Image: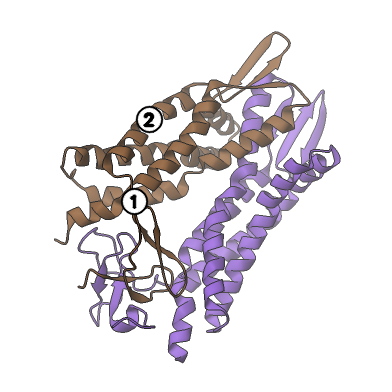
Amino acid sequence: MNASLIACPDCDLLQHKPLVPPGGVARCRRCGAGLYRRVPGGVDRTLALALAGLVLFAVANLFPLLSVRLGEDLVSATLAAAVKALWDQGELALAGLVAGTCIVAPLLVLLSILYVFAPLHFGRLPPAVAPVVRSLHAFQAWNMMEVFLLGILVTVVKLAKMATILPGPGVVAFFMLIFLLAAAATAMDTEAVWARIGIR
Amino acid sequence: MTGTHSALRLGLAGCHSCQLLLRVPARVRSSTLRCPRCGAVVHPRKPRSLSRTWALLLAAYVFYVPAMVLPITRITTLGRLQEDTIMSGVVYFFQSGEWPIGLVIFVASVFVPVLKLLILSLLAVSVQWRSQWRPRDRTRLYRITEMVGHWSMVDVYVVTLLVALVKAGALASIEVGPAAFYFASVVVLTILAANAFDPRLIWDALEEAA
């Protein structure tokens, strides 16, 4: 099959792969869908971002996101504690959804990036690289950390009249992790991974 | 070879996972085609796309009613029970002068889910009627629904945090209302409905007519 041809994922138009400058996006000439990007980052940048992301992930999950001050008492909530509070109320599905979209999905994104790109750094392809890269896209789709951050903002405003709300160290890491994950997604050149696998 | 033809018409299909172009054998236009490079199952068109989209959309419409009508939080302060729905939360923010937050909640919890349901229904109807009306714009609408859907989760996260903080802080006792489950279901169902819809069907109607 001719490697210079591509079918648009949104409208199925068969077309020649448009040439794009580094960092640019190739678009379908019929429906305007993004076809592929020329990624300037490469393996090492992706790997560095994912490693830093893993550290931030630990901080975001181990330290409180928000604290409430009541007189002398300071009560804090971590992400896990928030999930557990839902669970304790019998809202198992909701607890699972929140844990899935804000803890499990971002963790799996980070781990699969490391799994794929750490061996690539040493010039090797890890076993079962194809299913991992395919799942990576699904994990990214269900990662909703940025929405959770908006939720934190709304909660702060909502509770501001009832008590003093203080941001915890977790929320800073949470905020930075959102940007790191976005940067890693931009730097990640899955096209190069597919090209390396080739057709068996 | 390239003009205004879909890949399918020329007996080809692009892998949705790695974009490799494959030849679709004449008889195997079903689920058995696998990408030789990444191993994903390749569907020239998503199987039973319209029926699955409609099923998920109908379920989302049904769940949207209890999500709006039932309380999302039940707060007890000094023995007084206060039940809040999503809309009463929005109204509260507008009345207390914090209208930017009220607007955020309104857009995320009311406007976006309704818009998404309506757009996906419009797309499904237009494909069913083989409409040739503005295919480029309809494809763009589809991409918008794919992009904005998860922002509706914000209210679910707010409830999660409220439960954790208010409970921990002993400010009052707070319980998750039944609307939270229905609302989260609406968000998940519309995301699944958007995934089930195949925008390539929009363009098939044009090629059939040509």
Residue extending farthest left: A200
Q: Residues within 10 Å of mark 1 (few under 14, many from 20)?
A: some
* Rendered residue at 67%/44% (across/down): B178
Q: Amino acid at mark 2?
A: Ala
Using the image, tell me which numbered label, if any, was put on residue A39.
Answer: 1
Chain ID for brown:
A
- Check the picture and name the quadrant holding the C terminus of chain A: bottom left
- Locate residue A92, reporting x and y percent: 53, 38
- Between B35 and B68, the one lying in front of the other is B35
Q: Is residue A64 above or below residue A16?
A: above
- Locate residue B131, reporting x and y percent: 55, 83
* Rendered residue at 26%/65% (across/down): B20
Question: B184 left or right of B40?
Answer: right
Label 1 and label 2: CA atoms lie apart by 20 Å
Residue B165 location, quadrant: top right
Label whose residue precedes the other's in the sequence (1 or 2) = 1
- Check the picture and name the quadrant holding the N terminus of chain A: bottom left
Instruction: Tell me the subunit letter for badge 2.
Output: A
Q: Do dots 1 and 2 share one subunit?
A: yes
Residue extending farthest right: B95
Residue extending farthest front: A21
Question: B174 left or right of A18?
Answer: right
Question: B25 left or right of B200?
Answer: left
Residue A48 location, quadrant: top left
- Locate residue B192, reporting x and y percent: 50, 58
Q: Which residue is mark 2?
A: A52
Describe the element under mark 2 as helix, strand or loop: helix
* Rendered residue at 24%/55% (across/down): A194
Chain ID for purple:
B
